[in-house]
Image: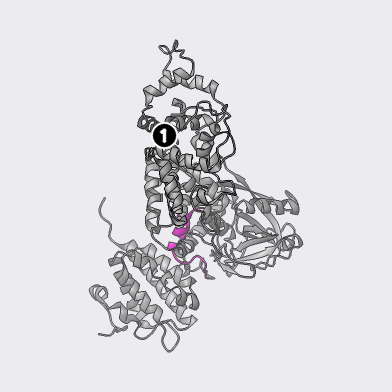
Amino acid sequence: MPIDPFRDYTLQEQRDLDLLQLFDNGIRGDDGRMTPELQGVGTVAMAIQALDHGVTVDMLGRIAYAADKATLDSIRKYPEDLTEELDKRGHGNIADVIRVGMSHIHTQEDGKAFARWLSLVHQMAKRRAADAPKDEP
Amino acid sequence: MREKAQSPKPRLNTTTKPPQTDTTAPSPLMPQGSPTTFSVIRLQGLIGNQAVQRMLMPAPAAPKITPQAAQHPVVNRGFFDDILDAVGLGEEEEEEEEVEETGGDTSDHEDTPASDEVSDEAEEEAEGSDSVFDDILDAVGLGDSDSEEDSEPAESEEEQSSSIIDDILDAFGLGDSDSDDIYEEAEDESEEEGQSLWDTITDFFDELVTDIEGALFRWTRVDKAKIDAQTVPNVLTSFQAGRIEGAVNRLDEDSYDRLRIILDNANSEMEFAFICKALSAGHTIDEVEEFADTINGMSERWLVQNLSVVDETTEEGETGRGIQQQFGNSCGPTSLQLIHAQADPIYALRLHSAGPVDAAVDDAKTNPENSPNSEMADEQNAILQSHADAGTGNAATDRSNPTGGAWVESDMNELVGATGLTFETKIIGTAITLNEAIDVLKTNLTRGIHVPIVVGGSVGDTAHYVVALNWAQSRIQIHDVWAGETVWRTEDDLRNSTLNLPSNHIMLTAVDVPTEADE
């Protein structure tokens, strides 16, 4: 079922969302902005699923940094800059989402939008991790 | 990225040629001299010449591994005992032998611990640092008590090389009474087979020396070779590399044992180097272990990108990206972060884990949520705020409103454990001349010490902190934290106030003179 950016998703639905579908409409819409499915439910769902799979907030921060630093050329030449740590730490499924995203980068603007999305995911994960209930001492 | 220095192969200097194929050049196995000195010299040649003597000497004046020396944290007395026991010269025999050497005078032995007596008397006899080496040779049957005085005619090179191999194999239980035959057979074999035998022998001795060295000292020749290979931009400076051995030797036994396990698990020499760098930056072994887990198995490209905050491999004419100030007046705190991160990979990783370090927004003060790296921004903000509260500076402003910040040398000096340095600001024209300032830069940058400097538009205009990273061929590499850009400028640019940095400043107006801390 395609992702509907204009409806509310429950927490469980976000946990079950097929993240690979986030990029069905590319990274940016016709107006040049990040697609609503990425910016909305996609950001939250990616953060939730990454944390669920054991990806750390720090890892997401480093990926956001790598994406921000990347140019169009470097993404083509060194795509592993964004996925190496995920792959090596056993989070290949999350790395796959990033690989699919990178495959939709055709311009420098696409790359910037993708880096912004990863930064949003990082921020969302950070907030969720900070708000997560702590065990009683 | 600049090509890395080739890793020196941590082998002995005996592998250049098999002896039977080299009849012209003097082999490292063929020291000139009498055959009686030869038994000492040839093994020295085999296992690293003077370097090995140094390795085997815990203290220059100690002719024996005395009880005092055995208490030295980097000397493993037990290893010596093991060697002596293995060859039937354990403690009892060792003492007896010493008694014989000292003329059998045992009159004081009832009142004085034997080991002290042995040590004292041996000290009188000792001539330089050869003594321990000679004892080891004696113990394994290769020694010659009169080796220094003997002056029989020298053997031919071929005889020497054959004899060396025989003696060595015999001494370590690998010998064969007919080893001459073995040698001759090898000689008769093809050159490749001869090389193979030679390699086997030298490999054996590589391992042997490494084991001896590793048992005696914490920081070995192989460790040093790995660090030397990684003393390259973005990994280690020569100054940072020089701090590592001391940091290792300061560890308690338990921590040292844990460090060895951590280092054994390193997947590359670069990983090894960054782990050592983290240790020398003052981190506990727990922190180092956690760090090592995080970077374990990562590519060198990943390591460099995540464990430094500027790109020191930026070439002339290129502009490298690196750490950027988040506020209109946080050049000082950002320079502080740069100095810290380049000395401490754990801190660098923490900055990167919080998001991009080389990006900034104009309104991070007004709208902190817009900051691409809130932790990095928060730290810059906190440093400025502490100065504002103390009346020694101004609070942070937006980048859209650049203004004065604060002198941050006191903050830098608090990082002495990480950097190994303290800094003192000298303003050019009052506390230091331009020539002296340039000398400070040359001296320290070529030693691998990063130097914060202040630039402006005229004499005394201490407008903006930047950091000098390298000096090469009358050129200086500078990271301008305003733009987050690394550039090269010439010595003439420094002298003529034509720096034209990305922040538009042109003149060197102050330098933070580094002083190496006692560690």
Camera-side residue of B120 and B25: B25
The stretch of residues the image draws in magenta is: B343-361
Which of the 4 image quadrants contains residue A41? bottom left
- Residue B352 sits inside the magenta stretch: yes
Image coordinates for residue B53, horizontal then vertical, percent: 52, 36
Camera-side residue of B357 and A4: B357
Task: Indicate whether B326 appears above or below B24.
Answer: below
Which of the 4 image quadrants contains residue B126? top right
Image coordinates for residue B518, horizontal then vertical, percent: 56, 40
Residue type marked 1 = Asn
Task: Indicate whether A19 appears above or below B62.
Answer: below
Name, please, the residue furthest toward the bottom: A30
Which of the 4 image quadrants contains residue A62? bottom left
Pointer 1: what residue?
B76
* Mark 1 surroundings: few (<14), some (14-19) or many (≥20) residues within 10 A: many
Camera-side residue of B30 and B366: B30
